Amino acid sequence: MIDISDVQAAARRIEGRVRRTPVLAAGPDRWFKLEFAQHAGSFKTRGMFHQVLAGDPPAAGIVAASGGNAGLAAAYAARELGVAAEVYVPVTAPAVKVAKLGKLGARVVQTGSEYAEAYAAAVVRADETGALFCHAYDDPAMVAGNGTLGLELREQLPDGFDTVLVAVGGGGLIAGMIAALRNDVRIVAVEPVTSCALHAALAAGEPVDVPVSGVAADSLGARRAGRIAYELAVDADITSVLVPDEAILDARRRLWDDYRIVVEHGTAAAQAALLCGAYRPEPGERVAVLLCGANTDPADLA
């Protein structure tokens, strides 16, 4: 099982390749970790850099499947490392993400209506070409790299914090946060009602397929939670709370109105848990909210 030693090793491997993103005080005992300012616009750059470096890609390069952000991270890491990248995304992937993939130099293939279909096509392609397949979330190196975000947050809040709210799709980020922080803070998973793979896995006693829809499906739309995230969540007794689409929309709008922060809908889910009461902190509880991605079209915030 991945633990803090794996995360610390990942931090050493990717040092100098990822940004140290800032923390914003959002009120008494509240902080935002502004990870959306990471290279390629999301936390996934941490894990993808580590996965590519650890995987020692062949001449054929790498292949990844993504709802958008993992693909962007793969394309960015590949470009920086001089490696060819091919990224499979569903036809429903936001145009802003698809366009950025091309700008980063990746070959983009759009197939299927959701992440699971793009994933299946990408696996076949990697087998055909001999390329390194880079999983978007259920890979030990990916998880360890994502966990460096937790180490960084702990350094930036030296007086401590009690709880961190983490938006969850397939579980790569929360798995990393559990590995990095489980002995220090409460880690709360936040999932949309309409895309709740980890919540369903915890209820069923194993990862299971779930229907995927809603405003955050492009980034939190994994049909099944990763095995790594599920096992870590069970071992650490993680709580999962659900938020409806209307709360996500409201949180995204209020992040813009109140802080001039532009994030994608999946990212806003973490803040939605506080605003709609899905998670209610105790008096004096110190809470950090991970704002983990901003690959979105801000036109609807004007």
Image: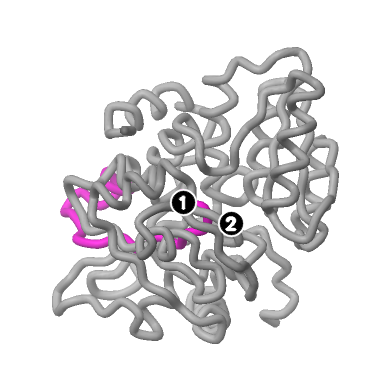
Badges 2 and 1: C-beta atoms under 8 Å apart? yes
Residue 223 falls left or right of residue 14: right
Amino acid type at mark 1? Gly
Q: Secondary structure at mark 1?
A: loop
Query: Is residue 284 shown in magenta?
Result: no
Viewer can see residue 177: yes
The vertical placement of 41 against 280, above or below, is above
Please give the residue where the numbered disc 1 appears in the rendered image. Answer: 171
- Mark positioned earlier in the residue sequence (2 or 1): 1
Name the residue at 35% across, 32% down.
7
| Frontmost residue, 144 versus 127 | 127
Percent x, y of residue 141? 47, 29
Amino acid type at mark 2? Ala
Q: Secondary structure at mark 2?
A: loop
The vertical placement of 186 against 146, above or below, is below
Q: Quadrant of the N terminus?
A: top left
Percent x, y of residue 268? 51, 70
Residue 101 figure quarter = top right
Q: Provide the residue span drawn in magenta.
A: 153-171
Query: Is residue 160 shown in magenta?
Result: yes
Name the residue at 48% across, 47% down.
226
| Frontmost residue, 205 versus 2 | 205
Please give the residue where the numbered disc 2 appears in the rendered image. Answer: 222
Density class for disc 1 (Cα within 10 Å; few <14, some 14-19, many ≥20) is: many
The vertical placement of 129 against 98, above or below, is above
